[in-house]
Image: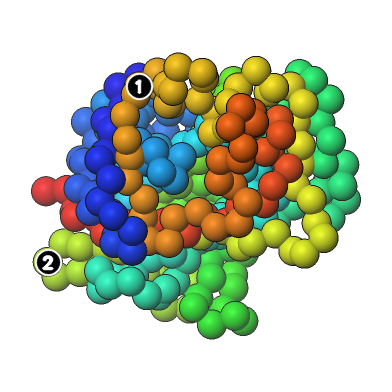
Amino acid sequence: MCITLILAQGCGSAVQVTSIAPSAPIVIDGKSDDWAGHLLYYRNDKLTLGVSNDKEFLYLCVMSSDQTVYRSILMRGLTVWFDTTGGKGKYFGMRYPLDAAPSDMGKDREEPPGSMDDMMKRRADEATKLAVVGAKKDARTEILLPGKFGLDARIGYKPGVFIYEMKVPLGIDLADGMKLAFSGDGRLSIRLETPEFEKGMAPMRDKSQSGMSEGGMNDGGMGEGGMQGEGSGGRGGRRGGGGRGPEGMGSADQAHKSVSLDFLMVVQKAQ
């Protein structure tokens, strides 16, 4: 898979991304096959991203090999906020997957070796709903997937890499007047956000990944897709205990620490 590396742009700034028109239909199946050659790797945030649009839909792909990132998404959910004015606010969002049940949090806190594939498959099978949420707390509409007008989302996993795909129709009233559209100058702000873990709640810990260093990178410093280089962070970056620990500490030592994602990008519409 070809992944472009983005150089650091400094803290506090939004990442500028140009959407790419798909050359073939993008299938929302939790796989990255349709995104070959259209992915950007942001090393500081341990994220690989792809954004695409045609006249009818916006497509989003989010990937990570960092356990603290994808476990946070799995257990707490990810909200993809959209600001159709191209600004930095939260006009409305798509929350997917929804929060895992408390019983699942306890059950998966200690994963035996070799069980990550099974756990990921179970999470993907259970993630059948998406919530359209507004900036106000009480604005929430749950939709069974695939939804009307082509709305869809799916998570997937291949050894060491978490994959998240979403497809949102453009110009359609999804819930309570919330529509996705680009601004007059063809811009759209997208913010990826996960909440912090609640105090006293320990995320899952997987003992099967002890051979990998923090962030899913091997000892040679290779990132996702076998590429090397520096990346950039969106606004705020990652919060919590997801940073690198003492020298020599691997992912098995770091995976139990909480992390929250806050990544902002301004997308330019594909022509």
Give the alpha-carbon distance from disc 2 to disc 1, as whole Å. Answer: 34 Å
Q: Residue at x 46, y 40 (%)?
A: 46
Number of marks in picture = 2
Instruction: Tell me the element at label 2.
Output: loop
Is the residue marked by circle 1 packed among few (<14), some (14-19), or many (20+) residues within 10 Å?
A: some
User: Foreground: 159 or 176?
Assistant: 159
Q: Is residue 264 left or right of residue 269?
A: right
Q: Is residue 92 above or below residue 168?
A: below
Which three-letter amino acid code belongs to the residue tagged 2? Answer: Asp
Is the residue marked by circle 2 packed among few (<14), some (14-19), or many (20+) residues within 10 Å?
A: few
| Of pointers 2 and 1, the one earlier in the residue sequence | 2
Which three-letter amino acid code belongs to the residue tagged 1? Answer: Met
Considering the image in quadrants, where does the N terminus appear?
top left
Q: Nearer the viewer, mark 2 or mark 1?
A: 1
Q: Is residue 271 left or right of residue 101?
A: left
Q: Residue at x 71, y 34 (%)?
A: 253
- The spot of residue 178 in percent (x, y) is 41, 73
Q: Is residue 20 left or right of residue 138?
A: left
Instruction: Tell me the element at label 1.
Output: loop
User: Foreground: 10 or 165?
Assistant: 10
Q: Quadrant of residue 250?
A: top right
Q: Which residue is mark 2?
A: 185
Q: Residue at x 81, y 31 (%)?
A: 111
Q: Which residue is mark 1?
A: 227
Q: Residue at x 25, y 40 (%)?
A: 7
